[in-house]
Image: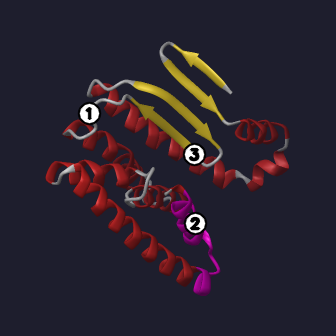
Amino acid sequence: MLFKIKKVIFEIEELLLIIVITLILSPTIRKFLDGYITCYFFILFHELAHIFVANVLGQKVNCIKFRLCGINAVLGNNNKLNSKWLLIFLAGPISNLILACIFAKVKFVFEINLALAIVNLIPIKPLDGYNILNVILNWYASSRSAEKIEKYIRVIIIICLFLLGGITLFFYKNPSILILTIYAILLK
């Protein structure tokens, strides 16, 4: 579902709308999804930090996509190799670290924001870490060399995530890192 306010396009995934309507209508289901809603709120805060810094630095927001797995602000395609973009890409993880510090005594909120900051700094597309790495590599290497280095780093990160995911699945019965690894492999 698409709609436009001023010059910004908002795209909302239909499945997300169904879940939101279900949450509104069913208090029983709402209890099970409290963690999801809380996490989604902090993802929204993360993306709003990107948007705020982009606006301060004169970059245009083209589209905001609301998906079941999160929110993504699509910014203008100006030269993404300058220091402005590094600040924009860092704004999201830094906002989550700030929230983690503010809510350090609220374990659940602290852990969500710390996890969001760390996961978003992993250098795999489409995460912020990939974009940060891309900006830095293009400062110091030709675009062809930067692409090769990115591919090697991607393989190393996926191997590390796979190993870490296997360990967490085996010892803690938690498949979340393996799911993230599969997601990273499918994105290419």
Q: Quadrant of the N terminus?
A: top right
Crowd around label 2: few <14 · some 14–19 · many ≥20 (10 Å)? some
User: Residue 72, position in %: x, y?
Assistant: 50, 39
Left or right: residue 34 versus residue 177 is: right
Q: Which residues are magenta?
A: 169-186
**What is the number of the mark on residue 48?**
none
Tell me if label 3 and label 1 are in contact, CB under 8 Å.
Answer: no
Q: CA distance from mark 2 to mark 3?
A: 17 Å
**Disc 3 residue type (three-letter):** Gly
Q: Secondary structure at mark 1?
A: loop
Report which residue position mark 3 lands on: 70
Report which residue position mark 1 lands on: 79
Q: Residue at x 57, y 45 (%)?
A: 70
Report which residue position mark 2 lands on: 182
* Dominant secondary structure, magenta: helix
* Camera-side residue of 161 and 53: 161
Q: CA distance from mark 3 to mark 1?
A: 26 Å
**Disc 2 residue type (three-letter):** Ile
